[in-house]
Image (cartoon, rainbow, N blue to C red):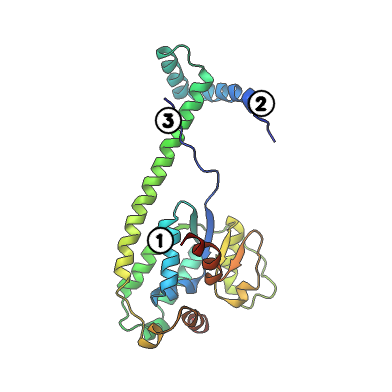
Amino acid sequence: MLSTANIQQTKPKIARILVHSNPLLDKEVRLRQSIIPLLNPTDIVYQLIGERLGELENERRQFIEARKTLLQEIRQDLASQKPREEILEMSDEELDEYVEANY
Amino acid sequence: MSMWKPITNQKPAKIIFDTNFFVSIAFQSKYLNKLWDFLAIEKAFEYNLIISDALFNEIKAKLFGDKIKQDLQEYSETRMEGILQKIRRSHLLINPTTKLAPLQNLADLEDMHLFELAMQEKADFLLTNDKQVLKQNPFGLTQILTYKQFEDKFLKQHN
């Protein structure tokens, strides 16, 4: 298990590796540092990662919200289909047993 | 200002519904419709419903089979297609790549595809009312529960 101190020591190394392997990230870090020179490059990298993760989380939420709307529309369509009377009158347990015995 | 937004570390729980769940849906089972909507709509961030082609094809065969036509007042292929559409919209399609050796005490070997899906995806729950399948509980990391057991354990606490 990594201790908090170990993580703090490792963060700058990971940030350097990320910057060296990704020219776009390198460019963004330099740009932000040119605007606010006191910003630490490691902090900038982690802030950028956080922003991107936040964007991905927002995209995921938007996708799920869109899916919810679609599912609610389908639910309304399905509500009009009725089984025959005997089945309609069954309790939850009776219906479960009927389906298991017959299907 | 940092735009950091914490993301939950907890992965969504993976759930498999057995074929007959959807037959009951065609029969307007209120509690199963509620369970499906709860997991796929209200708790969509906390649960992932998963399905394989083998399972989907089995559901399709039952929804378009002769037996169900006798049990519905007005059979409509369009409405059955609606259930399939809702399955497609609410499930993640996963096709297991490894075959498992047949399980002992499993009467119907055609159910093996459920276990292959559960094993490959490390599913958290396999929900079924099939007594033969329930006998295999627990299966690896997967709890095999009836719909009612799952509802009692997880759904009622949200109400």
In three-dimensional space, the C-alpha distance between marks 3 and 1, rounded to whole angstroms, equals: 34 Å
Q: Residues within 10 Å of mark 1 (few under 14, many from 20)?
A: some
Can residue B60 be seen here? The reply is no
Depth check: A71 or B148 in front?
A: B148
Q: Residue at x 41, y 57 (%)?
A: B42
Residue B141, image quadrant: bottom right
Disc number placed over residue A3 in the picture, else none: none
Indicate left or right for B7 with B25 as reference: right
In three-dimensional space, the C-alpha distance between marks 3 and 2, rounded to whole angstroms, equals: 24 Å
Say which quadrant the N terminus of chain A sits in.
Answer: top right
Amino acid bearing label 2? Ala
Q: Residue at x 48, y 74 (%)?
A: B20
Q: Earlier in the sequence, mark 3 or mark 1?
A: 3
Measured as percent of width and height from the top left, residue A81 is found at 32, 76
SS of the residue under disc 2: helix
Disc number placed over residue A5 in the picture, else none: 2
Q: Residues within 10 Å of mark 2 (few under 14, many from 20)?
A: few
